[in-house]
Each structure stands twice: as C-alpha cells, then as structure tokens.
Amino acid sequence: LHTLRECPSSFDLVFDFPSKFAFENRGKMLGPQSRYRIYGDISNYLTPFQEILTDQWNQGSSVEDLESQISRDFQVQHAIALPMARTGIYLAIRHLISPGAQVFMSPYTIADVVNVVIAAGGVPCFVDVQSQTGNMNPDDLRKKISQKSGAVLVTHLHGISAEIEEIQAICKQKGLPLLEDTAQALGASISGRKLGTFGTAGIYSFGTYKNINAWFGGMIVTPCGDLAKRIRNEIDSWPDFSRQRILKKTLSAASITLLGWDPLYRSLVHRIFRYGSIHDVQAINRIVAIELDLSRRDRLPKHYQCRISPGQARLILRQWKNLKRDTQIRISAAERYSSGILSHPSSKSFIKPPAPDAHRHVYTYYPIQCDQRESLIQWMMYFHRDIAPQHLKNCAHLESFKQFYTACPEAERVAQSVILLPTYPKYSNQDIDANIRIIRWYEESGQPQFDLKLKGLPRFLPPHQKSA
C-alpha cells in the first residue's frame, strides 16, 4: 500500500492491481498467522521440567504402554520405541542388509537420512522422484535394481503417500526388504491399512515439528519377530536419553512457540520476517531455514544411540487421542487449497499435490511447486502472507555425497520449486483463503519478478524484464 501511494504508476505499468486488496487491507495493522506451529499444548513444556525435577521422568511403564497402543491401533505385530526416527532407519538397514549392499532411496530428503544409511553399512543408490509428489518414482526404481540391491527405503514426504502398492510389488518380485520412512505421514492410511505397515519395517517420528511430538522420539513397526528381537537387543544396551537435551529442546521450542503466538507474530515477528524476505536479508532468512547441515557423516552420532524416556512416551500418549482429529483438519485444509487453486483457470503454472483421497494423504503441509519460487514467496510476503520454501536439497547432486552421484533431474527441479502452505490445525480458513487469493493474483499478473531498486521501494516487473 505504501508503494501504491508513493508510486502507483509502477504497478499500473505492470498489471491491473486488484483494488479489492487495497480496500480490504486499508488500515490493517496485523499480519497473518505463522507459517509454522509446534503441535501440543502447555503440558508439553511443563511436564519435562516437572518430572525431571521430581525424578519421575525415567520412571514407569509408559514406553511399553506406547508400544502396545501403536501395535494395537496400527494392527502390527511389533512396535519398538526409539530415541528418534533416524535411529530407526539406521537399525532397520543395519539388521536387514549385508555391508556394502545398495539401498535404493529418494534423493529428495534430509541429508542425515543419507548419513544413517551410510553409517548402517548401506550404499545409497538414488532413485528419481515423481513430478507431482516429490516421492520415489517406481518406474525409475524398477530400472535401477540390480544384483547388488539390498533394500528399498521409501519416504512419504509432506504427508503425501508414495506409490507404495507398486513399490511393494516391485520389492516382493525382487525379494528385497521394503522400509517406509513415515516420519511426515503419521496417521495416513490406504484402504484402512496404515502407511508404515506395507513393508518389512516402518519408521515414525515424534520430533519437535511432527504432528505428535515429544521433542525427540520415534517408533519402528515390523511384522518380523526376528528383526524386532535384534533391534530390541541392541537398544537395551544403550543409555537413557539425555535429560539435558530434553530440557534444552523444550526451552528452544518454547521460545519458538512464543514468537509464533498470534498477537506477537501478527504485530511484530511477521514484519521482521517479511522485511528479510523482501530485502533478501540472509541473517533474517536463515532464522527460519532448516536442513542447513549438508555434511557427510559415516558413523552414527553417539546421541542417536539411546533409549526413549518414559516421560517422552507419556507426552506421546497424551497427544495420541488428537491424531485423528488433527489429521482430518489438515485434510480439510488441503481440500480448501485444492478447490481454490486447482479449480482456477490460471493454475496451470503450478504443480499441486494429489487431491485428498480419504486418508491416503495427510498433508503435513500443502506443497505446491512454482518455477519462479523466490518471486512468488516475495510476492506473497509483500502482500502480508507468511509462507516458506521447502529447504530440502537433491542429495544426489550434493558435493558431500558426490561418491554416490546419480542423475536425478526431476528431484533437482522439485528441490528448487516447492513452497509449503500451512495446514496445521489452528491455521484459519481466512488465512488459507488469503493465500489462495494472492497466489491467483500472482499468476494472473504473469508471475512478475520482484525488484527493489525503484526509488528505494519494492516493485514488480514482468517476467524476464530487466530493471532499469
């Protein structure tokens, strides 16, 4: 609005600015809701301090209760609680393959997943992804399987189910164990069967930014009794989870939650992040960036090798009853995004995730892809929306994993184009509709490039037009 007042011709020359936006936002002081929100309530923050101070944190049978709950609800024979999901991937691979065997996996994942595969004795073999979902492409998997194959690790990214039935059929045909990284898809199911139960083992996460969180934590499920026994035997020799790490993470998460508190975020914090995005201030932008450590590690870190605490299990059990409700809210948010963006004539420049299909997809976020990602983000931030790029990289092309380089052009494209639209349960329909409206305007305006050089004020230029 400031730019409109100072230099309205800069907009008039580029696109027909919707006057409705100016009218609706006249005098508006508050920004949007936060792009991220940590799940859970105040007990998530108070309980660790209370139980650690009273020496109750490592007491009780809550770990066994949690394992029984998941085993029963997910109809799986064995469920084993873990300190984190990455430890589960490590243990499953370590006990299922021979050292040096290939582990087929998507390159569009966090670098540490590649690291735990290496630490477990596997050789990462990257399989390109599907354009719509960013998940493993079964056709590319079928082409790459060889005599050296040891296992397949499939990731259900952003709560979007991979083509698990087809991948399962390939693994059965080739006699390969199938592992499911279901860290971002807890609660998803296909025809009543939970994701994570289609293969030899499934791994879930209860980390800080997951839909059920115990600050750290994970779970591995398997129908294989021998595998479960070997994993339990190894875990039993590990020490208890560090109380200091729990307290440190709780305090860190509390500060993030405070910054994301609606009155504070809308009135102040969003303004700072908005400035950083519009003016490309890396010192600000890095605050909300994730996956900054892309280095290679060939050994499992010591702090990954520990046992989950009964106190963490109690946090998970307390939130377990909310799983179905929160999942349905996110699916409803995805339906709103899908009908609002997909149905619009101007939506052809974006790649959207699959539309809701019962509980097959649970939409941790609603990921859209735009080849002008940075311009779209700056456009949305300028018009007081709060979104973020997906910071995951194409690990197949990273320098740290050059030993395992594989041409994965689709993963490279996806890694440079995904934007995450919020779906968390407290995110309002009003903010969803505002996101949709601004995305539509961006597309209708020809996907303009963002420019900061017009008399010190931002403006938008048509695509590929150079700044004067």
Image (cartoon, grey):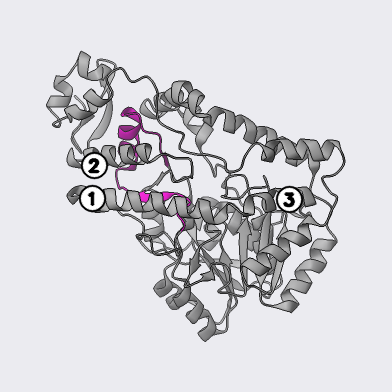
Give the image location of residue 419, x and y in percent: 39, 45
Residue occupying image coordinates x 74% and y 72%? 228
Quadrant for the N terminus in the image: top left
What residue sits right under mark 2 in the picture? 440
The reply to whether callout 3 and callout 1 are in contact (CB within 8 Å) is no
Magenta-tinted stretch: 362-388
420 and 126: which is toward the camera? 420
313 and 163: which is toward the camera? 313
What residue sits right under mark 3 in the picture? 314
Secondary structure of residue under mark 2: helix
The reply to whether callout 2 and callout 1 are in contact (CB within 8 Å) is yes
**Dot 1 alpha-carbon crowd within 10 angstroms: few under 14, some 14 to 19, many 20 or more:** some
Alpha carbon of mark 3 to alpha carbon of mark 1: how far? 45 Å
Q: Is residue 100 above or below residue 132?
A: below
Residue 122 seen in the current view = no
16 and 295: which is toward the camera? 16
Hey, which quadrant is residue 74 in on the image? bottom right
Closer to the chain start, of discs 2 and 3, is 3
Q: Residue furthest right?
A: 55
Residue 356: say if magenta.
no
Marks 2, 3: nearer the viewer: 3
Secondary structure of residue under mark 1: helix
The amino acid pointed to by label 2 is Arg
Closer to the chain start, of discs 3 and 1, is 3
Marks 3, 1: nearer the viewer: 3
Closer to the chain start, of discs 2 and 1, is 1
Disc assigned to residue 420: none
Q: Is residue 144 left or right of residue 351?
A: right
The reply to whether callout 2 and callout 3 are in contact (CB within 8 Å) is no
Residue occupying image coordinates x 47% and y 73%? 191
Give the image location of residue 188, x and y in percent: 51, 62
